[in-house]
Image (cartoon, rainbow, N blue to C red):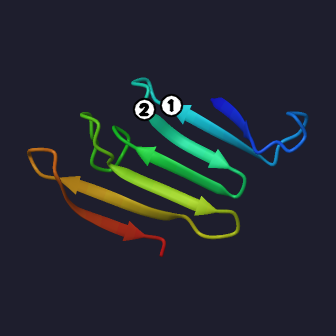
Amino acid sequence: PITKKLHSTNGGTSFLETLEMRYNIRGWVKSLQAGAWSQTLYFEDAPAPQYAGNIGAIAWQHTGQSQKRYDYTYDGLGRRVSETVSGT
């Protein structure tokens, strides 16, 4: 993972937040985590796998709340045609 420290008020000695980013083998952002927030993008590992760059699903969560998720479907030309929401 790549870690970035954000919002220093004392010249870089301490920071208010840390952002952790993970990437898949293609260099696409796979997940982000910062404090109470986390988000994961699914491509080839989605319920309907996507190999051409389309996002198959996205899930996110705030600490203390249930996970929310969108699963996407695409037509033969790669255009998003619908999504299914869960965790609302």
Which residue position is annotated with label 2? 28
Q: Position of residue 21 (x, y in %)?
A: 59, 36
- Measured in 3D between alpha carbons, the distance from the residue under mark 1 to the one under mark 2, in whole angstroms, is 5 Å
Q: Position of residue 76 (x, y in %)?
A: 8, 46
- The first of marks 1 and 2 along the sequence is 1
User: What residue is rendered at 53% in x and 58% in y?
Assistant: 60
User: What residue is rendered at 72% in x and 53% in y?
Assistant: 35
- Do the numbered discs 1 and 2 sit on residues whose CB atoms are within 8 Å? yes
Report whether 76 appears left or right of 8.
left
Q: Residue furthest bottom?
A: 88
The amino acid type, in three-letter code, at marker 2 is Trp
Report whether 81 appears left or right of 14.
left
**Residue 86 quadrant:** bottom left
Q: Relative to 37, does residue 28 appear above or below in the rendering?
A: above
Q: Relative to 42, does residue 1 appear above or below in the rendering?
A: above
Q: How many marks?
A: 2
Q: Position of residue 36 (x, y in %)?
A: 70, 58
Q: Local crowd at mark 2 within 10 Å, few (<14), some, or many (≥20)? A: few
**Residue 72 quadrant:** bottom left
The amino acid type, in three-letter code, at marker 1 is Tyr
Residue 69's disc number: none
User: What residue is rendered at 64% in x and 70% in y?
Assistant: 65
Q: Local crowd at mark 1 within 10 Å, few (<14), some, or many (≥20)? A: some
Report whether 84 appears left or right of 8.
left
Q: Quick one: SS at disc 1?
A: strand
**Residue 1 quadrant:** top right
Which residue position is annotated with label 1? 23
Report whether 29 appears left or right of 45.
right
